[in-house]
Amino acid sequence: MRARRGFTLIELLVVIAIIAIVAAMLFPVLAQAREMARLEACMSNLRQIGQAFWMYLQDYDERMPDRRDVKQQLGYRPWSSWPPSDPRCGWAGIVLAPYTRNWNIWNCPSVSGSMIGEVVQVKQAVAPDKVTRYWMWRFDRIQDPVPPDNFWGKTPEGAVADLQANPSPFYTRPDGQADVELAVDPYFPRTIGTVEPALRGRAVHRGGRNRLFLDGHVKWLRDIRTE
């Protein structure tokens, strides 16, 4: 009788090696595709936040919220490290709730569950099941009168005029609303000495961040200060 021929050990090892090589080649591509999908989801979140702001403006005589009371109640906490103020936006999640459909828009898919998403400078809980993880630098302080670079209670035109009249090394002089940032992914520049070593260079998205501007458009910004 003729014996059946099976795979030899060497043939099996060769097949396994080929599969491992192909998997190693595909893994970075799949990881990049997954991150791009998260990046797009993050941009969609910011667009919805921008739309909520504009609906609020229409209902409140074209003036942005002045809810420093809510910000203080949630625990206003400027840091001696980075960031030097408190740009967390839990207050906005509460105030804009009537204009948003889903609380999840306040969390980028790439930050939820990550190390950076759990640090106190980023995560702000307003209820056990409601957390925000975006930053809003133009609503980062609670002083009275409102600082020139903060937007509490201002019209969009007035906010731009204040930035134009008060130049700062922390932002470029805007020509209009399309140049003014409203919300952004958290980031910890490696060039700033006060950033905690464990967070230095960290960002939600590799090499940069998404930004929502006052006119409602969203744009990706590359930042060499982050990894």
Image (cartoon, rainbow, N blue to C red):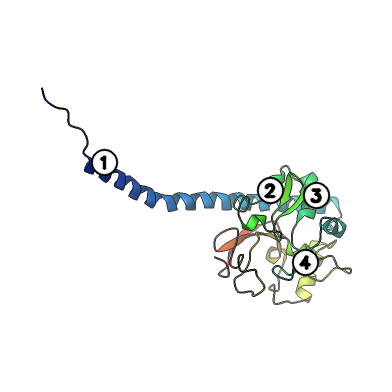
User: In screen coordinates, is 121 left or right of 64?
Assistant: left
Helix, strand or loop at label 3? It is helix
The N terminus: image quadrant: top left
Q: CA distance from mark 4 to mark 3?
A: 20 Å
Q: Amino acid at mark 4?
A: Pro
Q: Amino acid at mark 1?
A: Leu
What x and y, as percent, mark residue 215?
71, 59
Mark with earlier residue (3, 1): 1
Q: CA distance from mark 4 to mark 2?
A: 24 Å
Q: Say which of marks 3 and 1 sits in front.
A: 1
Q: Residue at position x 20%, y 33% from top?
A: 6
In this rendering, the answer to whether 225 lies above or below 76 is below
Q: CA distance from mark 3 to mark 1?
A: 59 Å
What x and y, as percent, mark residue 169?
70, 77
What x and y, as percent, mark residue 104?
68, 46
Q: Which residue is mark 4?
A: 78
Q: Which one is nearer the viewer's eye here, 86 or 196?
A: 196
Q: CA distance from mark 1 to mark 4?
A: 60 Å
Helix, strand or loop at label 2? It is helix
Q: Which residue is mark 3?
A: 94
Q: Which residue is mark 2?
A: 105
Q: Which one is nearer the viewer's eye here, 72 or 44?
A: 72
Mark with earlier residue (2, 3): 3
Tell me, yes or no, whether the two marked residues, 2 and 3, touch with CB atoms within 8 Å.
no
Q: Which residue is mark 1?
A: 12
Q: Amino acid at mark 3?
A: Ile
Helix, strand or loop at label 1? It is helix
